[in-house]
Amino acid sequence: VPRTMGDRIWAVYEIRAATRRTGDSRARKLAVEQTVEVPAAHVPPASRAMVGVIESLEKRGARHWRVTYSYDHAVVGDSLLQLFTLLFGNASLARGVRLAGLAMPNVLLDRFRGPAFGIPGLRRLCAVPARPLICAAAKPIGLSSAQLAEICSAFALGGADIVKDDHGLANQVNAPFRERVARCQDAVLAANATTGGNTLYFPNLARGGEQAFDDLEFARGIGCRGVLLSPLLIGPDTVRAIAARGEVAILAHPAFTGGLLQASHGIAPEVLYGTLFRLSGADGVIYANAGGRFPFGIDGCLAINRALRTALGKLPPSCPVAGGGIDAKRVPYWISRYGPDTMFLVGSSLYSQRDLRAATARLMDSVKRTGNG
Amino acid sequence: VPRTMGDRIWAVYEIRAATRRTGDSRARKLAVEQTVEVPAAHVPPASRAMVGVIESLEKRGARHWRVTYSYDHAVVGDSLLQLFTLLFGNASLARGVRLAGLAMPNVLLDRFRGPAFGIPGLRRLCAVPARPLICAAAKPIGLSSAQLAEICSAFALGGADIVKDDHGLANQVNAPFRERVARCQDAVLAANATTGGNTLYFPNLARGGEQAFDDLEFARGIGCRGVLLSPLLIGPDTVRAIAARGEVAILAHPAFTGGLLQASHGIAPEVLYGTLFRLSGADGVIYANAGGRFPFGIDGCLAINRALRTALGKLPPSCPVAGGGIDAKRVPYWISRYGPDTMFLVGSSLYSQRDLRAATARLMDSVKRTGNG
């Protein structure tokens, strides 16, 4: 992506094609498919400027080409979902097409605005100016609201910065949403009163449509300062709408995203989690870390971290949240790899230590020692 | 999936594993990952009933196994998004896991309710009791509202049953949402007044969050009887919430779904488009037809058709909408393959005939002859 991009959207794709000729033909078809979606010969004059311009086409491997498009930002208008459609709407239905890079003009970045808090805001909410942040997860489903509140209490007494709901906690009969969220929030506040600490409880909003905003109002009303959202389920534009209110911080969960992370089809993790989730308004973005339960490598994680923290118009940086099976003992190592502007989501590793409070306290000690905090 | 499934959710996955032992181990880990997400040894007694029960594990190929789980429906509660999370939330982040079958108890089907109209309702709205339905698409982006209205008019004068917006039409400066939708609706009504016909105009709602409901109100207020939604962008639960109002019919667009359609990872098209989009409330589900611009085969299309039309609790059948590059001349052939309870979305093929009205009229004639209508 060039430094001078003018007012256009720049998108880079890796596409599969045997020769330059077939690559060029595929690239031209994609430009039409993603925008005007009528045969190239029948694009009316008023629509010609909407078709993606092929800025370059480079060979990247035996059967792989890298094509860079630029688009008039008018294609997107004021709809974040239309940006997703432009980038990977019908293209998702093809094979061997991977969005690998994205740059947007300020006019678009200013429109969607991104995180209301970002790293500085999360640090302010958590009252942690410099060290890495630690997030614990209240679970599992099946427990009563009282049992989940006890778990939240233990994490807060141990000094975790944030306790988030597991993304599977919704509005189940054993722990209905309002009862659960109220009890967990109360438990964390009570623990804070005991310790003098400042743990925050972020409930999961697992209902969409209008209900998402009712649930948000409830959580905010009882004092929650953040929520957990799964952007690809609740919808990226619902994330944006919640961020635009500026009331609560948002942690984005990667549920349902994995189909997009194929080696030769989909969206590069740094574009999906890094640029697109940040643009949607996530203050922190959870991803499955290298060396955990999921098959992701360190390079992708570093690329996500960079994308979340890099300059992007007036958007604040979003906080990388490494999760998906982080061993509490390895957190100091990951701090050395990822730096202090990172949140670590430690789940199972705390649960397997049984005494959640003591396990959390040990983890926080190690973070404070390592993280210079 | 057994005939007597009790009150449980049954989900069938194809998983990659070299041996029965590794297959069994993967299956057990997935059961935990998708529900309680704590190490198996640390699942508290109250949560044990939430873990998926492995009902069977069968070899399906060299390195492929078919595992059938049953789950307590209490895992889902009243959240449609939590059903998506249960079925393919964290599992999406693994490799070689494909949801291939799904059956749900009536208690859950009754809760989410599905389409408000379904095939019978769409037929009622279109005043077409028996023959296949034809949908045309207003496009391309870049045109003014007046130009798009002219196109809608031509399709309506030609007698299309439905004219839907292209899924790329959002709220762009050249054709702002309200202006465009009002003009297109007016143009279709005026054409109907001329022909005595009954063409319906379905605008695309490309904005999510609260704005989706504002846009819906506007469209309904000026008399639109249906809308186009992309469930994986606007969010399946927003689709459900709009369907639950019972005010407008919903056509679901497959934008952004393609990452899920891998051969060995993702969700089988008949489960995604067939069961899940129908459950979310789509009255018609657009998919990329075999032999069109996208790489899908006939077997998948037939499976989608079956899943949309089959008995599913009290849900009405949803209408398969075959699109993605259907040649107008081939519609009679596809009618012979898919039967009359199908909608055909014909786009580019009409545009390349230039005279949209005449092209549409020819298509409608051929449908009425073939479709016994």
Image (cartoon, coloured by chain):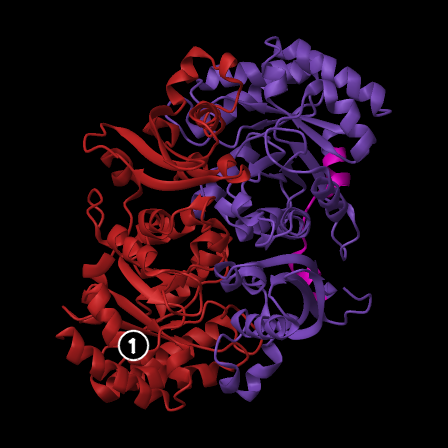
Chain colours: A red, B purple
- Residue B172 placement, left or right of A258: left
Where residue B2 appears, as percent x and y from the top left, is 80, 66
- Relative to A124, say whether A141 is above or below: below
Q: In the depicted view, which residue is nearer to us: B45 or B118? A: B45
Q: Amino acid at mark 1?
A: Arg
- Residue A145 placement, left or right of B86: left
Where residue B103 appears, as percent x and y from the top left, is 72, 61
Question: What residue range appears in magenta?
Answer: B107-124
- Residue A242 placement, left or right of A169: left
Where residue B72 appears, as percent x and y from the top left, is 65, 73
Question: What kind of secondary structure does the magenta stretch mostly adopt?
Answer: helix
Q: Residue at x 57, y 71 (%)?
A: B26
Instruction: Give me the chain letter of mark 1.
Output: A
Q: How many marks?
A: 1
Residue under numbered circle 1? A330
Q: Residue at x 55, y 29 (%)?
A: B222
**Residue B82 shows up from this direction:** yes
Image quadrant containing the C terminus of chain A:
bottom left
